[in-house]
């Protein structure tokens, strides 16, 4: 549904506010999920370093193992020399950034970290603890 279609159907400011609240709740539900989240750096630096192949390998591995995860993309975060980057955020755990990845690293990260909860220390380039750095 386009913005024009939505605004044509809204008859009052109260309806608009109601719609906004509904959409905000839906977005919060998606972002506060109990599912593991995989975030692939897809800025131009990441793409040039091979991020598309990393994303493809992630999608294939997740499908093959039938695991329920959220896969998203992000732009450049300023660690261009460490691309391609993959962040893994397990529910209730710190966010781990893996870098300088090769396609063959994806399976290892999925199996060891996403499935078994063990961080692949030799591929870690950053950590983001809940509530800060």
Image (cartoon, rainbow, N blue to C red):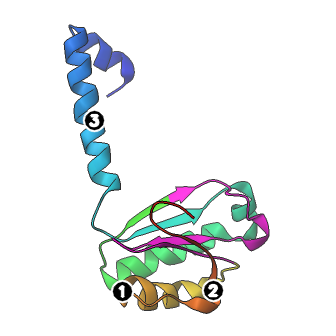
Q: Camera-side residue: 30 or 68?
A: 30
Q: Which residue is mark 2?
A: 123
Q: Which residue is mark 3?
A: 23
Residue 58 rendering spot, x and y as whole percentages: 49, 75
The magenta segment: 73-99
Question: Residue drawn 74% across and 69% down?
Answer: 49
* Among the two numbered marks 1 and 2 on one chain, the one whose residue lies closer to the N terminus: 1
Q: Quadrant of residue 103?
A: bottom right
Residue 86 rendering spot, x and y as whole percentages: 57, 71
Horizontal relation, residue 23 to residue 58: left or right: left
Is 87 magenta? The answer is: yes
* Among the two numbered marks 2 and 3 on one chain, the one whose residue lies closer to the N terminus: 3
Question: Residue drawn 35% across and 70% down?
Answer: 69
Q: Which residue is mark 1?
A: 115
Residue 1 rendering spot, x and y as whole percentages: 31, 28
Count neighbours of disc 1 (C-alpha within 10 A) and say few if under 14, some if 14 to 19, many if 20 or more: some
Image vertical order of residue 71 relative to residue 7, above or below: below
Q: Secondary structure at mark 1?
A: helix
Q: Secondary structure at mark 3?
A: helix
Q: Camera-side residue: 115 or 8?
A: 115
């Amino acid at each position: 549904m386009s913005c024009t279609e939505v605004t044509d159907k809204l008859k009052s400011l109260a309806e608009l506010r109601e719609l906004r609240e509904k959409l905000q709740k839906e977005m919060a539900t998606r972002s506060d999920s109990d599912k593991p989240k995989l975030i692939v750096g897809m800025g131009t630096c990441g793409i040039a370093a091979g991020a598309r192949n990393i994303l493809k390998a992630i999608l294939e591995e997740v499908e093959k193992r039938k695991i329920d995860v959220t896969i998203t993309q992000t732009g450049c975060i300023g660690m261009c020399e460490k691309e391609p980057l993959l962040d893994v955020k397990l529910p209730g755990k710190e966010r781990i950034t893996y870098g300088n990845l090769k396609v063959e690293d994806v399976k290892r990260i999925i199996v060891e970290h996403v499935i078994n909860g063990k961080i692949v220390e030799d591929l870690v380039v950053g950590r983001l603890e809940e509530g800060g750095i």
